Amino acid sequence: MSIATEQESVIGSVPKQLLIGGEWRDGASGETFAVEDPSTGETLCEIADGSEPDAKAAIDAAADAQPEWAASAPNERSEILYRAFELMGERSDELALLMTLEMGKTIAESKAELTYAAEFFRWNSGEALRLDGYFKRAANGAGRVLVMKQPVGPCYFITPWNFPAAMGTRKLAPAIAAGCTMVIKPAQLTPLSMLALAELLREAGLPDGVLNVVTSSSSSEVSKPVISDPRLRKLSFTGSTEVGQMLISQSADQVLKVSMELGGNAPFVVFEDADLDAAVDGAMTAKMRNIGEACTSANRFHVARPIAEEFTRRLAEKMGSLKVGRGTEDGVDVGPLIDDDQRQKVAELVDDATGKGARALVGGSAVDGQGYFYEPTVLADVPADARLLKEEIFGPVAPVVAFDTEEEAIAAANDTEFGLVSYVFTQDLKRALRVCEGLETGMIGLNQGMVSNAGAPFGGVKQSGNGREGGNEGIDEYLETKYVAINL
């Protein structure tokens, strides 16, 4: 089968409609919108454009299915999740190609995301069997205390475009394990992976109405009626802080249980005693995962002055060796940015920094031709007032600044309204503990450039959000605690 034929086959196999109450159906308006290949700017396909009536039908379906699903056996929920995990492994080739076509990352990166995404199904297949409470004698001896955990109820999920599978499974899996029904609105730019996952979950045995998918070109039009519905009990969003703040405000009327994974501005701190080879390798992982379009991406590099020049040189050498191109092509390391708006934002941030005195050791420009490509870039001598030290870059750009003392490094790392993740490289155990305790962040990569793990709590502090996804804490977001006082 030729590459073009394989791509057509994969796109053709994906549902293009809305999933409501177990039925794939057109949107109420009959309208569609285009899904684009960011490596060419060409349309891959047209899918249903959901609107307000579709959103209302979706929350109706979720609410109707909630009582029966909440009463389902934990074994049933566990088996569905594990079967979904197995199916994702069996279909990783097709799902990876689909993701690369709609998002741009390389096939290798798409497969890595799918492995990560599937782990949420596997991890939560166990969590479904670990839901418990407790029973004890009251302190005064006069009665008994019974505490139980129950599903919070219908949930609404809004997922981003950068990890179109993992950001979905990270929410869907614990909700399924807990016994919650769901409405999900995938990102307009990358909805195909979620549509494919929804069909996969149906095949894994998920009952009708438990998961409802509404694709739309207008997030606000479909979100408002769902969030304002009194039957909704949980809202989870991954995306920008600005949108998250608006959603939190909207959720207040219903006093919804809310979890938000919002913006980041991750510092990557390298001390003089660090293993420099490991630090550069970690920097490449932390910076270039997903073309730099990740909330966990290292946004600014704070390096001890005695090693700053050598670190920057080595990082520039590695960044300059990366091959830029379409993610489906062999040997490509860096795909396109998601769209022209994102590429222009990256270019503006780089131009601002170089205009203020920063030097581009490698890269620094958009790539001519089709698609939304930008060169992997390393900037030295970055001034303190450069915008990219304060704003999330979301692209393949690494600005490096030097520091002189540990206290200065911690202060610089914390000098942001965000607090999602930080990276620290040092071989001094006492320093490592001091710095990790001093950083205002929800997660830390200590001597490694990756923190994502289905078995660990993912989330941030300050304006990077609230709540945790994954780990032992993740399922708590989908459970309510009920206490029964027993007179004995």
Image: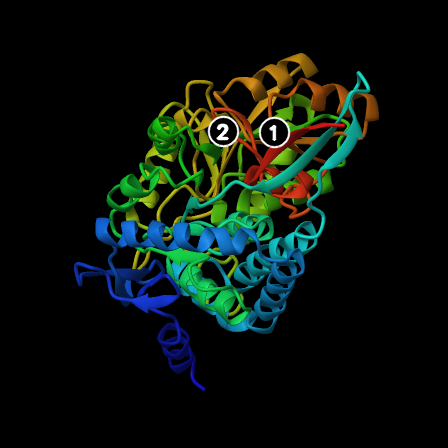
Q: Which residue is mark 1?
A: 442
Task: Name, please, the residue furthest toward the front.
Answer: 488
| x, y percent for residue 464 | 49, 29
The residue at the point 64 percent across, 35 percent down is 311
Q: Is residue 148 left or right of residue 346?
A: right
Q: Is residue 367 above or below residue 286?
A: below
Q: Earlier in the sequence, mark 1 or mark 2?
A: 1
Considering depth in this image, is 371 or 439 the residue closer to the camera? 439
Is residue 433 at all visible to an observer of this figure? yes
Quickly name the residue at label 2: 464
Q: Position of residue 70 (x, y in %)?
A: 54, 51
> Would you say residue 327 is visible in this rendering?
no
Left or right: 306 with respect to 252?
right
Residue at the spot 43% in from the left edge and 61% down from the top edge: 193
Mark 2 crowdedness (10 Å alpha carbons): few <14, some 14-19, many ≥20: many
Q: How is the image coloured?
A: rainbow
Establish if 26 lies above or below 255. Answer: below
Proximity of marks 1 and 2: CB atoms separated by less than 8 Å: yes
Residue type of the residue flagged with mark 2:
Ser
For the residues labelled 1 and 2, the Cα–Cα distance comes to 9 Å
Quadrant where the C terminus sits is: top right
**Label 2: element kind:** loop
Residue drawn at 69 percent across, 16 percent down = 406
Q: Residues within 10 Å of mark 1 (few under 14, many from 20)?
A: many
Badge 1 element: loop
Residue 321, given in percent of the width and then of the height, sits at 55, 53
Q: Quadrant of residue 238?
A: top left
Vertical side of 251 occupied by 220: above or below: below
Three-letter amino acid code at disc 1? Gly
Camera-side residue of 381 and 424: 424
Judged from this view, the residue extending furthest toward the bottom is 1
